[in-house]
Image (spheres, rainbow, N blue to C red):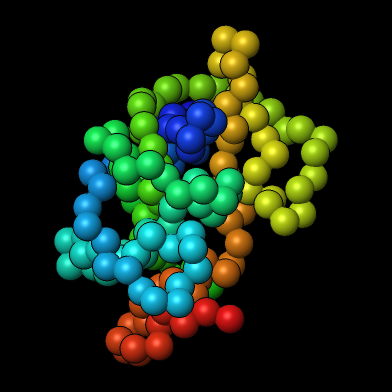
């Protein structure tokens, strides 16, 4: 399987490329007042309004550094009834690597508040944090733009 490597601070992370649509450079994002701190903003991607989540802020509580190598990983995201696009901001997006299917090692650690974490990929004695995009919490749905253009789309609980 093809995997994308990137950093969140000093932590090397990976995701499967099967959901990745494109890697975009960091662009100016439209921010929204009162949005969660992990919500970096929106941007126009080929006519679609795409919400961007700061992965480092979401997972580790510190915002991504804005470097020349900071990128937005555009991924297909399954909402309740449809497929959408969501952006994930990450630092130092480095490369893609081919790994066997069994490369993602399941740990006995069960993190209820973060089921998308816990698994690792081993690369020459280095442990890489695997992030399972399929297990991201449904609360990210609050960042989607409804089809009818409802202006309350960015409101969250």
Q: Is residue 1 left or right of residue 89?
A: right
Residue furthest toward the right? Answer: 108
Left or right for 9, reference 132: left
Placement of 26 over or under 125, stated as above or below: below
Q: Residue furthest top?
A: 124
Q: Residue at x 22, y 57 (%)?
A: 28
- Residue 20 seen in the figure: no
Total numbered circles: 0
Task: Place residue 93 in its image quadrant.
Answer: top left
Image quarter of the C terminus = bottom right
Examine the rendering and report whether any part of residue 56 can be seen.
yes
In this view of the protein, which residue sits in the foreground, 101 or 117? Answer: 117
Residue at position x 36%, y 27% in the image = 94
The location of residue 17, given as percent across then percent down, is: 42, 38
Residue depicted at x 49% and y 63%? 37
Q: Residue at x 51, y 48 (%)?
A: 62
Residue 56 percent coordinates (x, y) = 50, 46
Task: Give residue 35's quadrant in the image.
Answer: bottom left
């Amino acid at each position: 399987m093809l995997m994308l490597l990137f950093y969140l601070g000093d932590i090397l992370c990976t995701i499967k490329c099967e959901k990745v649509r494109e890697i975009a450079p960091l662009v100016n994002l439209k921010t929204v007042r009162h949005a969660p701190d992990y919500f970096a903003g929106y941007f126009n991607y080929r006519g679609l309004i795409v919400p961007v989540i700061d992965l480092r802020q979401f997972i580790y509580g510190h915002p991504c550094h804005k470097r020349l190598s900071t990128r937005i990983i555009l991924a297909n995201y399954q909402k309740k009834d449809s497929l959408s696009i969501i952006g994930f901001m990450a630092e130092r997006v480095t490369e893609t690597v081919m790994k066997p299917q069994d490369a993602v090692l399941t740990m006995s650690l069960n993190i209820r508040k973060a089921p998308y974490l816990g698994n690792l990929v081993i690369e020459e004695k280095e442990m890489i944090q695997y992030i399972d995009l399929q297990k991201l919490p449904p609360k990210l749905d609050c960042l989607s733009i409804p089809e009818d253009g409802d202006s309350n789309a960015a409101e969250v609980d």
